[in-house]
Image (cartoon, grey):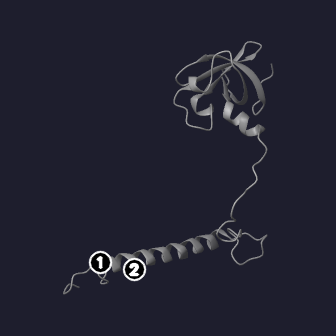
Amino acid sequence: MQLEVGKIVEGKVTGITKFGAFVELGDGVTGMVHISEVSNEYVKEIKDHLQENQMVKVKILSVSDDGKVSLSIKRALDDQRPPMKRRGAPPRNGGNFGRGNRRSNEPLTFEDMLSKFKQTSDEKMGDLKRSMDSRRGGNGGRRSGSK
């Protein structure tokens, strides 16, 4: 069997450990799916997600020089799903994120985005200071008579 990184193949789970599962791909080739590559959800116990002799689709992530094959079940599933369509409300900025007042096909430069971020940050800090001042009696937290 020719192992090609990025290819999705089917294999049989032959062993389960605390850190992953071993999957036989055929022709005597076995790879390992690390626990972090089993599911898009948090996996505490692999046995809750996989069983020995179960057939699974895996994506080949890498093949090391010494023949170790790294596999992923979750990436194989992600590659087989059609792209999701965005639903719901448009972004708060009207869908013009990162473009400012320019034509829609001209992105902001890094400097423009940094300036916009700084301006927004300064506004938020001003609002926060005013809020804190009003809680402290409006004098900025200073006691009367102090400088």
Q: Which residue is mark 1?
A: 136
Under circle 2, the secondary element is helix
Q: Which residue is mark 2?
A: 130
In this view, which residue lies farthest toward the top?
28
In this view, which residue lies farthest toward the bottom?
145
Q: Position of residue 86 (x, y in %)?
A: 73, 56
The quarter of the displayed image where residue 106 is located: bottom right
- Measuring 59% from the left and 38% from the top, which residue is drawn there? 41
**Mark toward the start of the polypeptide (1 vs 2):** 2
The label shown at residue 51 is: none
**Label 2 CA crowd tier, 10 Å (few <14, some 14–19, many 20+):** some
Q: Quadrant of the N terminus?
A: top right
- Mark 1 residue type: Arg
Q: How many marks are shown on the rendered structure?
A: 2
- The answer to whether residue 70 is above or below residue 13 is below
Q: Position of residue 28 (x, y in %)?
A: 73, 12
| In-front residue for pair 144/29 | 144
- Mark 2 residue type: Arg
| In-front residue for pair 137/33 | 137
- Measuring 78% from the left and 31% from the top, which residue is drawn there? 7
- Measuring 57% from the left and 26% from the top, which residue is drawn there? 48
